[in-house]
Image (cartoon, grey):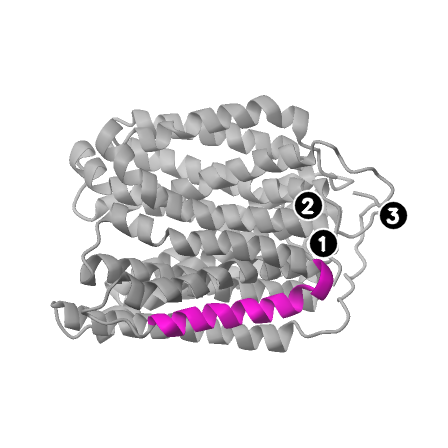
Amino acid sequence: MSREEAPDSRRWLALTLLVAAFFMVIVDSQIVMLALPSIESELGFSPGGVQWVMSAYLLSFGGLLMFGGRTADLLGGRRMFLFGTALFGVASVLCGLAWNDEVLVAARVVQGAAAAIMTPTAMAVLMHTFAEGPERNKALGIWTGIGAFGATAALLIGGPITDGLGWQWIFYINVPVVAAVLLFGRRLLKQTPVQPGRRHFDPAGALTITAAIALLVYAVSEAPLVGWGSGQTIGMLAAAAVLLVIFTLIENRSEVPLVPLRIFRSPTVVGGNILMIIVAMAVYGGALITSLYAQQVLGYSAIKFGLSTAVYAIMSIIGANLSARLVARVGYKPIAIVGMTLLSGGLLLLTQIDPNGGYWSDLFFGLVIFGSGIGSTNVAASIASLTGAKPEESGLVSGINNAVFQIGAALGIAIASSVAFAYTTGTNVEGLNDGFQAGFWATAIFALTGLATALLLLLHRKPAQPAPSTGTEAGKPSVAVHH
């Protein structure tokens, strides 16, 4: 959006639609966990096979994010966001109607692919709707806070919906949200700039990067079960690395690459995305160990756990919105450092859990600090990783931002659970507590690494200027955030 263009008076209503769709995507990635036992018994999944109800969604979602983001740049963000939302709605209905395990898993693959189109295109529309500076930062703060709350909301509503209405309704509840977004989206949402020239989708690049990300996420997700040194894990990680090398070669030679490699010449883009990976590792690893400790040591039910840990989702929303306001005054770099300090402090406090502990003595204060850090770090890392993107590449950089978050989440969960299992000394609460303490230490190390990253990579006094791009419109302003 140019500086001369008056702000759209309906931009906050547009943001409401965008965050509603994002909230739905986040809830859908988590809510299924509480319905898996019912799904397994009713559809006759093989032992261990029911995990594919979650894995199928996460793999197609994570693997297709870059391609989904690129479609916004080539075909228009609003058009692709509405298409992805419609596809998500159709897939949700198919999930609820599934008559066997194969149909449900296939529908979840489609649902994940739709989410991979919706998420980066929604962020691209957001970037085009709000001018750089305080308003965009505030919008990103709301976006981040809603995402954090979505994961907790899934734990709060998943159990009652499954028990009261049946597991099918965890998918049917998406239908009214999809209908509202489609009904008002064309009227409220602005179309994003489309990359000029020939619309080239770079199928070879899209195929290799999708396969590489999917293999990487699957390898690290399965590593705690099959072992980090197993042939499966090593083979998949090696295959992912080979595909990444091939992808780089393809992009380097392509006239119209899926991912122009010059994007990674910006220290803020690279630093922001590295920080985003580490933040996701700390957040998802910490959330997993918190869930295991609360339910296996303190004996919480799923509903009680969701209620008791809502505090860190609330603090995340507060932290995200406060940070978004402060960014206009101090820049995202101090926010990143403060956020990583809070994240580290909260996780270090949680390492002091006790087998005979309780909510107030062992969880509450650590979760308050932890949640505050989640909101701050997500806002700072998002702003950094999106800085310097051209309007016609906003979908791509959004896709990269979301893809690295998914990779970080998978790594954090896999490493934290592996450490917890390795240090568990028995099946009683004392032995389990030993393992969970070690898991919290692992996530605290992630956060401290993120703090070092914020200090080393984000303390540049001048924003990096994006490299000149061929084939873009002359005079287009860059989508940069003021420091």
Q: Which residue is drawn at 73% across and 38% down?
A: 194
How far, Cα to Cα, is label 2 from label 1? 10 Å
Secondary structure under badge 1? Answer: loop
Image quarter where the N terminus lies is top right
Indicate which label's residue lies in the foreground, 2 or 1. Answer: 2
Please state the total of marks drawn on the protein image.
3
Which residue, given by chain and number where applicable, does mark 3 sit on?
A: 474
Q: Residue at x 26, y 69 (%)?
A: 436
Q: How crowded is mark 1: few (under 14 residues within 10 Å), some or many (20 or more)?
A: many
Sequence-first tag of 3 and 2: 2
Which residue, given by chain and number where applicable, does mark 2 sit on?
A: 127
How far, Cα to Cα, is label 3 from label 2? 20 Å
Indicate which label's residue lies in the foreground, 3 or 2. Answer: 2
Q: Residue at x 35, y 75 (%)?
A: 441
- From which residue to which does the magenta span run? 328-350
> Is residue 285 at least partly visible in the picture?
no
Residue 101 in the image: above or below residue 255 = above
In terms of image quadrants, where is residue 93? Answer: top left
In the picture, measured across the screen, residue 248 lies left or right of residue 198, that is: left
> Is residue 111 at least partly visible in the picture?
yes
Question: Does 336 appear in magenta?
Answer: yes
In the picture, measured across the screen, residue 385 lies left or right of residue 233, that is: right
Q: How crowded is mark 3: few (under 14 residues within 10 Å), some or many (20 or more)?
A: few
| Magenta: main secondary structure | helix
Which residue, given by chain and number where applicable, does mark 1 sit on?
A: 389
